[in-house]
Amino acid sequence: MATQTKDYYGTLGVKKTATSDEIRKAFRKLARKHHPDVNPGDKKSEEKFKEISEANDVLSDDKKRKIYDQLGFYSDNIDPAAAEAASRGGYGGGFEGAPRAGRGGQEVPFDFGGFDFSGFQGGGKAAQQESAGFGGSFRDVFSGMFSGGRQARGPQPGTDLEYQVQIDFWTAIRGGVTRLEIQRQEQCPTCKGRAVVGGSMECPECHGSGQVTQMGGRMKFNIQCPRCGGSGQVQNACPTCDGAGVLTRREPLEFRIKAGTRDGQRIRLAGKGNSGTEGAPAGDLYLLIKVGSHKLFQRVGDDIHVTVPVTAMEAALGAKIEVPTIDGDNSGAGHTQLKIPPGTQTGQKLRMREKGVPSATREGKRGDQIVEVRVVVPKVQDERSKEILRELQKLNPEDPRAEMLAEV
């Protein structure tokens, strides 16, 4: 069965000299008018939308458009180099404008119309015969023109999904259960992922032959039928999934966050991605964890940093003070005692071993808590306190700027 040449430029309503921008604008205008969502149940609009989509697919791609302009039709099976040679008459004059020859000076065009080259692509005797006029076999001449037809889809593994999950500070520290709603593709229950239902029937495009004919100038080419993939048989698309094999569903998901989970960590849930077709395995679901902050604690890796104010007297004389920790109950933080050494300066950091976050990767290990001291200078208001401080200054006449000024 011969496949009719399609006028893609006419379909989009543009000239052959149209720019890529003009083609894009024409497609968008027509797509808005004929989109199935705008015309529900309108079969004519649906077919028109398919036609303009096909035209746009070819004309918006520079390589596909070049082949279409050279041969007057397009197929995924056409090799660009061979199309270029054919358009220049490099295949023996089978196209318009090619050299002509004849007896007695009368020019007669080479016309291969109706000639079926499919017999030269098999393993028979005809495929091995050499033609002196072409300098090689017909298969050598035309093998580069078509690179083989589309194969049946077959089982397709499901694709992976990725979602960003926001959890609070305490859930990341202590672990817990988090809920999320995801959108994923599930195997169609009607066709079981096969995308088709019922038995096979004769392909209406090629009438069971597995091949269709494309015209290139005055030459005909038999190529594999794009609708049935060369089998000559087709099946009805599943009405439930429209031949996709999968259906898109929203699904609630509950998963556990391990204690010590870090910000930016990627959690893999095997088989929770999009379903495969025809029994192929499903993809995976990846959860990108974003952890909320805390007004008091700052987490660095598995360590917890906290700034604690101390009085000048506590810093000078040393003291035991209460500091907050993450070891509280489920409602929040706890606290424990920390010894401040005498003479502690503001900005000094004290380490509390294994008071940090439980490690999510090393069982039984914890980080530390780093306490930064901030010395608070008292606001003296009564004369008695001022007198005591003046006396203290006389007893300790150190100049904290002396070393700095000496370097200057």
Image (cartoon, rainbow, N blue to C red):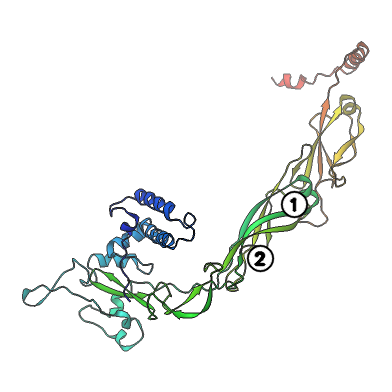
392 and 105: which is toward the camera: 105
> Could you classify mark 2 by the number of other residues whose Cα lies within 10 Å: few (under 14), some (14-19), or many (20 or more)?
some
Residue 207: x %, y % from top left: 38, 79
Amino acid type at mark 1:
Thr
Residue wearing tag 2: 271
Q: Nearer the viewer, residue 218 or 35?
A: 35
Q: Quadrant of residue 391?
A: top right
Label 1 packing within 10 angstroms: few (<14), some (14-19), many (20+): many
Q: In percent of the image, x 75 and y 43: which residue is there?
A: 299
In this image, 18 relative to 168: left or right? left
In the picture as drawn, the residue positioned furthest to the left comes out as 104
The mark nearer the N terminus, 1 or 2, is 1
**Would residue 356 be found to the left or right of residue 147 on screen?**
right
Amino acid type at circle 2 is Gly
Indicate the position of residue 347 as horizontal and vertical percent values: 78, 31
Q: Is residue 2 above or below residue 40?
A: below
Position of residue 391 in the picture relative to residue 307 (left or right): right
- The residue furthest top is 383
On the rendered image, what quadrant is the N terminus found in?
bottom left
Task: Tell me the CA gap for discs 1 and 2.
Answer: 22 Å
Instruction: Give residue 200's position: percent from left, percent from top.
Output: 48, 80
At x 39%, y 79%, the residue is: 210
What quarter of the picture does the C terminus occupy? Answer: top right
- Left or right of 318? Residue 119 is left
SS type, badge 2: loop
Q: Secondary structure at mark 1?
A: loop
On residue 77, the disc is none
Q: Nearer the viewer, residue 272 or 324?
A: 272
Q: Position of residue 327 (x, y in %)?
A: 86, 45
User: What residue would you read off at disc 1?
Assistant: 261
